Amino acid sequence: MMSATETLLRLPFEAAAMFAPTRDLFSLGLRVRDSHEQLRLDECEFTASDYASNIWRFEHCARAPGLTVILRPRVEGGVLFLNFAVAGVPTDCALEWIEPLRLCVANPHGELLLPRHEGVLVKNPLRNYEPQEPGWHNYVFFPGYDQMQFLGYFADGAGLCYIARDRACGLKYFNIRKDDLSMELYCRVYCGRDFGQEFEAGYEFSVETCRPVWQSACARYRDWLENSGFACPKGNYPEIVKASPVVVIYPVRGRGDDRGDMGYNEYYPYLKALPVMDRLRRQLDSKLLALLMHWEGTAPWAPPYVWPPQGGEALLAEYRDALHKRGDYLGVYCSGTAWTQESCIDRSYRPAEKCATEHLESHMVVGPDCKDLEALICSNPYGQRLGYDLCMGDAWARQTIIDEVRKLANFGLDYAQFFDQNIGGAAHPCWARNHRHAPVPGPDQVENQKSLLQELRERFPKLLLGAESGAAEPYLEYLPFSDMRYACWDMRDAHPVSAYSFIYHEYVNNFMGNQNGIDFGIDFDKQPENLLWRTAYAFASGNLLSVVLGPGGSLMWGWIIPWDTSTRPDQESELTLLRNLNAFRKQFPQFMVYGRMLEPQNEVAGSKWTLPVPWRFSRELDAFIPTWWQAPNGDKALVLTNFRPAEQVAEVDGHPIVLPPLNAVIIPLN
Ligand SMILES: [Zn+2]
């Protein structure tokens, strides 16, 4: 008898040739009420009914009698669609997740596009990538660290796009699994159902072909998005985005690190930063947004309580007013919806006693055993704090966040990157049975987070809010200016690409961010032009630009780089590049601000440039960055960004184009 995957691959969809049959088409996980254990079931444990109709029923699983998985495949226009449902869930179990479409690729040595950060392209994932399994303390999920609901895969001159067409944006996990020889694509859908409840997906997965470039997979996803009822308006940017300030990021305590002496530095009291800001405003010929770190009156990176600022409101108000008088803006970093038990930066700050006295544990995110409270992000003895995460399905936790944001808004800050560490604006999965959500993670947590963000926007419309990394799809409307840091965490195995901007740039413009963690991913000394490249990359993705300050107003490689680090970027080149690219951005807003990124329209060739990374290999990249844009009026252009301090010549469809140093050129295409 043919297996389910064999049967599926005989359906006449165009991407079928890119897959090979495998044992299990689906798997699912039940959470047992009393033991809290997970019962994992694979397709091979079920007896299938015949595949004659387009409703496939899988039944008679010995470990869960009565459980039925229903798959409804169909093919339309060469595209495979799959809807799914689960019935007969035992009353002592909750349906936690299902992976309804596990597909083994025929050639596992291709390129994989993951939807995390702004998009990450993995070359030969079978060899270069160690995927994690989803679950508690894995925070790589959609919507969050994964901002989009698709995977791309490219091999043998062909490409495919694997999409979850879920307008409700329920909780999911996209990744691959592999062994020595084979690799599968899958998506785990977190169902968030109560004990004994059935599940009916209100949407379909789809698998379709595309050109073998990442932009083409993004274009397929964007096509779906724009026809799906996605409600975020195009081009409705906040005032700050339209003004295009350079974001100037610096701490007021410490010397460039989250460790060591946390005494006030030369940027405190706050007004002491003004001479540096005045100089940068002249040198960059631009408005500025001062974005402070280590400013919290509690301890650095010690959420949820951050207010008042170090030294009190009056001291920061002087600086705010001085910036506003110059036409500049003031913002702060916060740390999102985590809960600090003890600061590891300032040991004197210990809310653990408050937590114990007021029995606050019940408001926290808990793991599958309903006991484990420990947060993962930044929470360890070598990190910023020890602590938990607040659950936004809990009324007290939610009110605590609203109250803290109110203080920032009432003060008159222009911007708060409030949801740092809630990557992509994420709410973390919670298994608590006393919160306003199902006993297992699922769509409820997305709805809770979304309604919180909506409420914050309605209550405090003048305070612009953002997250760490671009806001994930359902949160995008409420977090319209976020820290789009370079995806250095994935640099070991992969290369970041502008997938996020390709899909969402007409809806949101983010900024280059503080580049936190960049020291993990790039060897500064071996390639001193790396900051020039990252700046150009941010610009070419349509983001606003940023700098991270060290002592004396010097430009650093990023955050966290201690101020006594021996090397610095070439200051003059970086300032020139920033000035030129921000001017270009303001000169061509129809492309760089309001534009729609396009698939490659030309053959572009030229010099190469090497970016050494601290692990196994160096990355060979183009020595300039080409991006294709379409303006709202239909005009198309190729923008070539030369981040190097020397002139270059690129060939565009065989024609030489001179690229001046540290600048961009525009080539109209119609
Ligand atoms: Zn919860």
Image (cartoon, grey):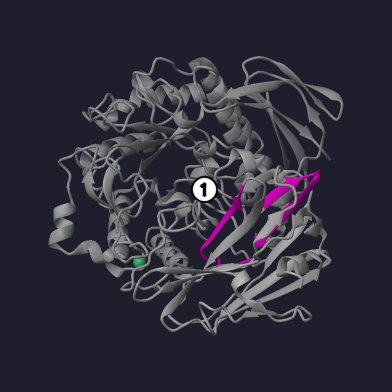
Is 643 left, or right, of 484 in this rendering? right
The residue positioned 33% from the left and 65% from the top of the image is 369
- Local secondary structure at mark 1: loop
Q: Residue at x 64, y 61 (%)?
A: 102
Query: Compared to 265, does 63 lie above or below?
Result: below
Q: Residue 660 appears at what percent x and percent y?
A: 69, 19
What residue sits 71% from the left and 64% below the top?
206
Is the residue 89 above or below the residue 452 in the image?
below
Q: x and y percent of residue 341 in the render?
A: 22, 50
Task: Count neighbours of disc 1 (C-alpha within 10 A) and say few if under 14, some if 14 to 19, many if 20 or more.
Answer: many
Front-lying residue, 99 or 551: 99
Q: Classify residue 228 as left or right of residue 40.
A: right
Amino acid type at mark 1: Gly
- Please tell me which residue lies in front, 144 or 574: 144
Q: Quadrant of the C terminus?
A: top right
Viewer can see residue 24: yes
Q: Position of residue 291 (x, y in %)?
A: 38, 37
Image quadrant where one finds the N terminus: bottom right
Highlighted magenta segment, given as a residue range: 152-179
Question: Does 160 appear in magenta?
Answer: yes
What residue did someone put label 1 on? Answer: 470
Q: Is label 1's Cβ within 8 Å of ligand 1?
A: no
Q: Position of residue 397 (x, y in %)?
A: 29, 63
Q: Quick one: 573 or 529, which is closer to the camera?
A: 529
